[in-house]
């Protein structure tokens, strides 16, 4: 009787290990896919800004704006801020945050 119990216990452990490994793989695949999708969306958004001539032309003005704590506001920066807000009406952030974002491109 002990041999049957031992064999049954071994079978259950193998099946439980297989189920755990399978659920781990499925969970890992789902997480990786969702991270890849959000990364692609972020990459698409930032690459479109990197190619935007109005935004790129405002980098020097954005640097002056950030360095002066908002005192120096160049014409190119004003145009870029207006352009960004027209392109993305749901964009949240004040002028300082947007100027910093322009600098990071």
Image (cartoon, helix red, strand yellow):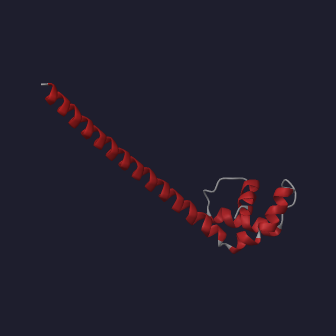
Residue lying at 62% horizontally and 60% vertically, measured from the top left: 89
Where residue 82 sits, quadrant-wise, is bottom right
The answer to whether residue 105 is left or right of residue 25 is: right
The residue furthest front is 3
Q: Quadrant of the C terminus?
A: bottom right
Report the label total: 0
Q: Quadrant of the N terminus?
A: top left
Q: Position of residue 67 (x, y in %)?
A: 85, 57
Q: Position of residue 68 (x, y in %)?
A: 87, 56
Residue lying at 62% horizontally and 64% vertically, measured from the top left: 46
Q: Position of residue 24 (x, y in %)?
A: 37, 45
The residue furthest left is 1
Q: Position of residue 75 (x, y in %)?
A: 82, 68
The residue furthest top is 1
Residue lying at 51% horizontally and 57% vertically, measured from the top left: 38
The answer to whether residue 18 is left or right of residue 86 is: left
Residue lying at 15% horizontally and 29% vertically, measured from the top left: 3
The answer to whether residue 35 is left or right of residue 98 is: left
In the image, residue 20 sits, relative to residue 51, either above or below, namely: above
The answer to whether residue 40 is left or right of residue 61 is: left
């Amino acid at each position: 009787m002990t041999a049957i119990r031992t064999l049954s216990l071994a079978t259950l452990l193998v099946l439980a290990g297989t189920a755990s490994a399978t659920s781990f793989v499925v969970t890992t695949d789902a997480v990786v896919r969702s991270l890849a999708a959000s990364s692609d969306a972020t990459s698409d958004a930032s690459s479109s800004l990197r190619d935007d001539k109005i935004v790129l032309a405002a980098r020097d003005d954005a640097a002056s704006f950030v360095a002066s704590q908002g005192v120096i506001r160049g014409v190119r920066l004003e145009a870029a801020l207006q352009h960004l807000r027209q392109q993305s009406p749901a964009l949240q952030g004040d002028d300082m945050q947007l100027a910093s974002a322009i600098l990071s491109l």
